Image (tube, helix red, strand yellow):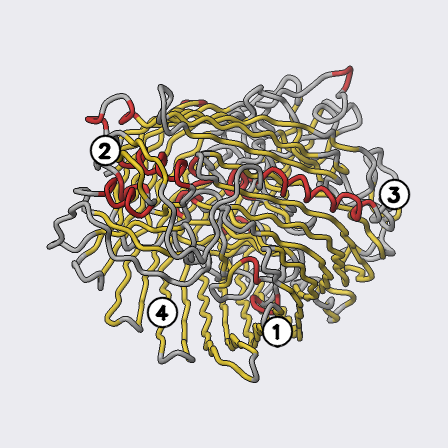
Amino acid sequence: MRGFSRQAVLLLGTLAFTATINSGPLQAQSGQAQPAQQQFNIPAQPLNAALDTFARNSGWQVGYPAAMAQGKTSTVVQGSLTPPEALARLLAGSGLTYRVTGPNTVTLVELPPDSSGAAVLPPVVVQGSTPRIESAYGQVDGYVATRAVSATKTDTPLNETPQSVSVVTRDEMDIRNARTLGDALGYTAGVRAGTMGDSSGYGGDSTSIRGFGGDGTSGASSNEYIDGLRIGGAGYVAAGFDPFFFERVEVLKGPASVLYGQSTPGGIVNMLSKRPTETPFHEVEVQSGSYNRMQASFDISERYDEGGKVLYRLTGLAFDTETQTDFSDRKRVAIAPAITLRPSDDTSLTFLTRYQNDDFGGSALNWLPARGTVLPGANGNHLPSNFFGGDPNYMQWDRENYAVGYVLEHTFNDTWTVRQNARYMHNTLDYKGVYISTMQANQITANRQAFGMIEHSDDFTIDNQAQAKFDTAGVKHTVLAGMDNQVLMNDTNRVLQSTAPTLNIYAPVYYQTFSPGTYQKSNTRAEQNGLYAQDQMKYENWIVLLGLRQDWANSQTHNELTRTMSTQRDGAFTKRGALMYAFDSGISPYISYTESFDPTVGSFLSPGILAKPSEGQQQEFGVKYQPPGYNSFITASVFDLVRSNVTASDPARAGYVIQTGEVTTRGLELEGKASLVNGLNVTAAYTYLDAEVTASQATTTTLSGGTVPLLGKEPAKIPEHAASLWLDYTFSSGTLRGLGLGSGVRYVGETAGDPANSFMVPDFTLVDASLRYDLASLNPSLQGWKTGLTATNLFDKEYVSACSAAVRCYYGTGRTIFASLKYSW
């Protein structure tokens, strides 16, 4: 086992993050009765540039949606003025004013229609001495989110959340032009994103957290949620939701069953949908680039009435592209209407709907052999990264998904609030493909299987919550009680499979004939019911979190070919507890314990005896740091995570499993994000992960065909070390005003290529870059127009992203470059 003791030394690396984020002069602290006068010399210019100059000169932070400043210009600001006086003059005539939301922090708001906008000091609303408060569901300016909802199901500050949470904001996804969930999470500590690479057409969404999850054959992960509700569906139908439709992506690390029920122990990925906004905005964008990609998108948010009782948002995207892999093309059309109704200040109802249609060529199972990719092939041959192991005569991926849901919230008084989140989702899939199953002894000829399926699923999920806030003996409580239910009905109309003609992988002959027969036809109904309770307690600087949950899960599968029925029922009681101390300096150390369970559906120990649910337990110690006066956030954590009751194939009885397995992961994570007033954004992450099979009686097959025990082996696809760094800077003055530059580097260490550890996948380092320009800096008549250029894997490194078996290796994505033109108003 690799030494866990090194983590204590590596934890000191958080000091490097602190030094980086805190470089520069300290801002003025709260409590000043009257801001001091400063010298200002800001010429008339586009308002967004003037606000950047004001923020840099004054040290104040100005929060506003980018669309609010579009098409507006500032007035001249000169002389010795206090920051409020300077900001008032700068905004004169723009139709905007501001409110103070914290020490040296303001938010722009629109003036009432009858306001003149004269250059006088606007009304100042002081909301205490805390930093600017944001919503865990709404927009974030820059990279740094300070609140999240996934860890507690309540809108809670991250520095009061005693468990590791990472948030990727919309701004960060836009600047890096994230096109898959893997792209969005590529710079996140503890997350292995896109483990199935590009050679499997849908692997960009295959995501593991702390060594668990993301192991579905199609790229689908069992750890993905949208708006706090689990994505149901059997494997293939649930993969590949476009990140353009999400406001943020939150990663809760560690077991999450106390709030979410059955789930993998590594954690969950919660994608939060774009919702209607208070401030109207409109944008359209076109993109083009590598592999003849053509893409168009729009995002529009408006008010139906001046009072803001009805808000709506319409988001849409379409693209058509070829890919790195031969014969593989992709088309997508998606749209997401949303509407918010607010009949009173105490009640809000938001409808969230979406439709997505994918028409993809290629194969979801474009598995590649280790010999010829990671290892030398026969006679030293090497497979190119565009190799296709299927056949154009038998390939299809038509998937249609639509969802209708709502979020209802009503506040009765200062104590009680109730919420109901619900969603109905329908998926249909028509899939055909050919994949490599084994390699013959000459390591040239591939044995193949033809595989097809037609299936659809209906998934209904509802989560009812009651929240109470009250004080007892000086202790502030936020109590959450809930009851949730998920019903999944999956109908596999037909599954086709047969052997397929062999293929010489170095001289492939395509357009062969296939006629697979039906080998499976079934329907499944699975249901989960859960009751949970949680108490977030705060006494002075102490924070305590306690949670309990009881789950009942059952499933019925009807095999329509054999006319048989199998039933499985499981239940689990899970718990969590955590303690945190929030120092006034912004440092918040914590310790936590949490559990998970995950039913092993369809696994039998012997005839009629079902396997027990897999269970997870995690102990975590961490430190969070939010430097006062700076828009930055740093997290360091060490953890010990154990997954027990892991199943493995019974070597003595085909079709059955043994259940003595245990996998342990111990690790260290460091992550820092900052969006500074001088136009600099930073995100940095480092992960050390020690993963090992710590209990097992099973054996596994090696690359050469022998067998070895699983005990003591490293699980495949999990690197010991991973690190990333992204920097981008936007010029706000001078000849380069309006220009933004960004670059990042991602490192993934060596990984085991199969459960037997009989070969290793080499480490790799990738470089990404972005370039953007606000055309209004050239000419004010171009206000609202922006252009950009993004590149991933800039130096076109050929690499294998991961392997999980001798014939399950995946090439990563080569260099892709995309140009964009966006108009906002």
Front residue of this view, candidates 470 and 656: 470
Tell me the CA gap for discs 4 and 1: 23 Å
Q: Residue at x 34, y 51 (%)?
A: 107
Secondary structure at badge 1 equals strand
Image location (x, y in percent) of residue 558: 57, 65
State the quadrant of the C terminus: top left
- The mark lying in front, picked from 4 and 1, is 1
- Left or right side of 574 for 200: left
Q: Earlier in the sequence, mark 2 or mark 3?
A: 2
- The mark lying in front, picked from 4 and 3, is 4
Q: Earlier in the sequence, mark 4 or mark 3?
A: 4
Q: Earlier in the sequence, mark 3 or mark 1?
A: 1
Quadrant for residue 378, please give it.
Answer: top right
Q: Earlier in the sequence, mark 2 or mark 4?
A: 2
Image location (x, y in percent) of residue 99: 31, 55
The residue that mark 1 highlights is: 547
Tell me the CA gap for discs 3 and 1: 44 Å
The residue that mark 2 highlights is: 76
- The mark lying in front, picked from 2 and 3, is 2
Residue pushed farthest bottom?
A: 473
- Left or right side of 118 for 169: right
Circle 1 Cα neighbour tier, 10 Å, few/some/many (<14 / 14–19 / ≥20): many
Circle 3 Cα neighbour tier, 10 Å, few/some/many (<14 / 14–19 / ≥20): few
Tell me the CA gap for discs 2 and 3: 77 Å
Front residue of this view, candidates 558 and 590: 590
Residue 408's mark? 4
Secondary structure at badge 2 equals loop
Circle 2 Cα neighbour tier, 10 Å, few/some/many (<14 / 14–19 / ≥20): some
Secondary structure at badge 3 equals strand
Q: Is residue 257 visible?
A: yes
Quadrant for residue 656, please give it.
Answer: bottom right
Image location (x, y in percent) of residue 310: 22, 61
